[in-house]
Image: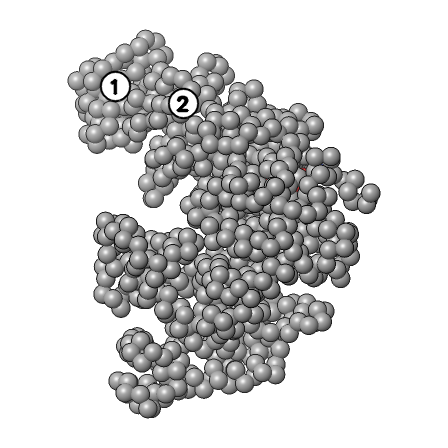
Amino acid sequence: MEKYLSQLNDAQLAPTVQKDGPMIVIAGAGSGKTRVLTYRIAYLMSQGVDAFNILALTFTNKAAREMKARIATIVGESEAKNLWMGTFHSVFAKILRFEADRLGYPSNFTIYDTQDSDKLIASIIKEMNLDKEIYKTKQIRSRISSYKNSLITVKAYFKNPELMEADKMARRPLMGEIYRNYVDRCFKAGVMDFDDLLLKTNELLTRFPEVLAKYQDKFRYILVDEYQDTNHSQYLIVRALSDRFQNICVVGDDAQSIYAFRGANINNILNFQKDYDNVKLFRLEQNYRSTKNIVNAANSIIDKNQTKLDKIVWTANEEGPKIKVNRSLTDGDEGRFVASSIFENKMQNQLPNSDFAVLYRTNAQSRSIEDALRKRDIPYRIYGGLSFYQRKEIKDVLSYLRLIINPADEEALKRVINYPARGIGQTTMDRLVVAANNYGKTIFEVIQNIDTLPVNIHGGARNKLKDFTTLIESFQVMNKTANAFDLAEHVTKASGLIRELKKDSTPEGVARMENIEELLNGIRDFVEGQKEIADATASLAEFLEDVALATDLDADKGDADHVALMTIHLAKGLEFPYVYIVGLEEDLFPSAMSLGTRSELEEERRLFYVALTRAEKQAYLTYALSRYRWGKLIDAEPSRFIEEIDDAYLDIITPIQERRFNPMLDADIFGDPEPNKVRFKKPVQPTLKKKGPPVSKATKKEVPTSKNLKPVSQTKGHTNLFDGKLAVGNMVEHLRFGKGEVLKIEGTGADVKAEIKFDNGGVKKLLLRFAKLEVI
Ligand code: ATP
Ligand code: MG
């Protein structure tokens, strides 16, 4: 047996050496699915399968690079190079480039990112004189995206009365028209958006049987990681390509399907066995990633989902510490807890920063974590924010480069035609757009032919426009001979961009200059890297394609030592020794938007499962009792997910940080037997809770222990009416809740509480020992 195969257990070995036929590996987190896929590729090559005939589709390009590097250590660098590996988008962008002319696209088509798509949609809405409050750009974009991912073309849309009716009901009767305009404009501009890369691949494979046959013959062995998150469009591509040889191997975990909101279809994995004949099903059960406590806790969570395949996950790893649950008063305190806990763990165990990850449900949550990490001088990196290539100054340079490759690219042109300022105003631009639409030309062509077309633009503006096209044309000439780096460097100077940026000597301005330098370095690396590959052209077009499809994770060279901050969605497939899952609060995680149906709630629960199973050694769950959201301080309730974890695996810790005192919140925790009555107005779905009122275990556990109770003396300095001066009917004022009337007083001794109806409408029970009240 080959040596590397001894690094697999028997269950993993079986799918690895199952050479031919359709097969699926369904297994829980950390059980080695990705490892099987990696080793399987090496095995296929050892069995004489040509690397050129293998296609592996991964969730990120970074994952593909890592797999390829691992395979290279087994089969050798030069062979591994020939493998086709990457995300669906990057692999099929390459194929589309070869075949573009069949679909009427130029082979140098450029790619719109979501920013570009949004801008085009916004300008279409404006040109159509539609109300942008009803026709919201982002909503329209996501509608269009879901049409495309379901393979509903414009034609299909207008043949589908149900869809049109649905848009009418949503007060968007012109949705179809916008869709048509958007598609036409992209086509005319010679660009594809992200969804087109899949949609057009499908079109290519269905309309041209000879093309399908060619790629079926090329990709004799197809492997797909994270199959549970493929959407319909991706599913059809895989089906079509694997149809002839049926050597298709997919691996996935239904319990980790978390992209339904982007069109992922969990049924793709559930139905795989129906889609092919004689499917071999493999299961892996041993988890190698995490401690027993983490594995068992994760199992106890996913157990609550009704829709799932039965799976066993166990581990031979050590028991490990219990999962720590921490309560904070505010999101700021939560950040401070996370930072000090990371700091302590680092110091005690001499660990690098890269051993730690902080995972959250929404990007907005990163701010309080960042603030706290910065205060402690702990280096961190946020993934998934604005990627490097989407920063303004970088997109400006890239837009010039895109225009060189593809002068029809409308959004690139609009971005730089008057940047740096050349005196080309909005009115001129509006007229150009109208003319382009009227004459069926691109804006660039209109400008090139401005003297022969009846366009209402006066002489001065005409000359400025002509100067601009001349500039771009001169770059195009240079592009024929110069390499991408020399060209890009020339462009930054000749366009005036550098001069413009140099005017700004603020730290931000300097940072922008540095970013441009970094981009140029990146282009130089690309050119150097391509030199090693015999048939590579190191062309600007290739560089732009890489950049357009780079995700934020891909940009990470993995060389710096920092704490990773990212959303759970992005963390799929990754692992870290220490993981902090923050913001475990009702309405945040699970998200308020997911509480409408069981299936949405189950997807949130899968998301929590993904988060927890990223941890190798130790997991922390944190929540705050109040949090700034949408600019307001709101009360929060611990997430039901904390309660759902079996007690045996939890360790409820008291906050490490100095607690700031908050009378209302502490009253709820320490005194009120029915806190939810006053605090939580939203009905909690009763079937989803195990028992009684929805009090979190985490909270409950803290109630009886005397060490959790803060001594009364801690209220020193507050006005409190604990000594019994308060009576029913008193009007009182509370620092946070304002004025109110005392409805009821109950309890004895340290537990005396007042029920107060505040003018703002809320009725609250306050523990007088703590409450900061004044009789007015
Ligand atoms: P996920 O569901 O999160 O994507 P996965 O099933 O793909 O997880 P891998 O990432 O392949 O799991 O493996 C999890 C960890 O366990 C990795 O660090 C991997 O190197 C390690 N591992 C897997 N199999 C073995 C094995 N047989 N021996 C030692 N380590 C293993
Ligand atoms: Mg994996």
Q: Which residue is more in the foreground, 739 or 626?
A: 626
Where in the figure is residue 233, as x and y percent of width and height? 47, 53
Question: Badge 1 local density, few (<14 within 10 Å), some, or many (20+)?
Answer: some
Label 1 to label 2: alpha-carbon separation: 27 Å
Residue type of the residue flagged with mark 1: Glu
Q: Is residue 192 left or right of residue 291?
A: left
Where in the figure is residue 595, as x and y percent of width and height? 36, 34
Q: Residue at x 30, y 29 (%)?
A: 682
Tell me which label, 1 or 2, sits earlier in the chain: 2
Q: Give the numbered dot on residue 326.
A: none
Number of numbered discs present?
Answer: 2
Relative to 539, does residue 271 appear above or below in the rendering? above
Q: Is residue 704 visible?
A: yes
Q: Give the numbered dot on residue 755.
A: 1
Location of mark 2 (residue): 689
Mark 2 CB near ligand 1 (8 Å cut): no
Where on the picture, by quarter, is residue 177?
Answer: bottom left
Residue type of the residue flagged with mark 2: Lys
Q: Element under label 2?
A: loop
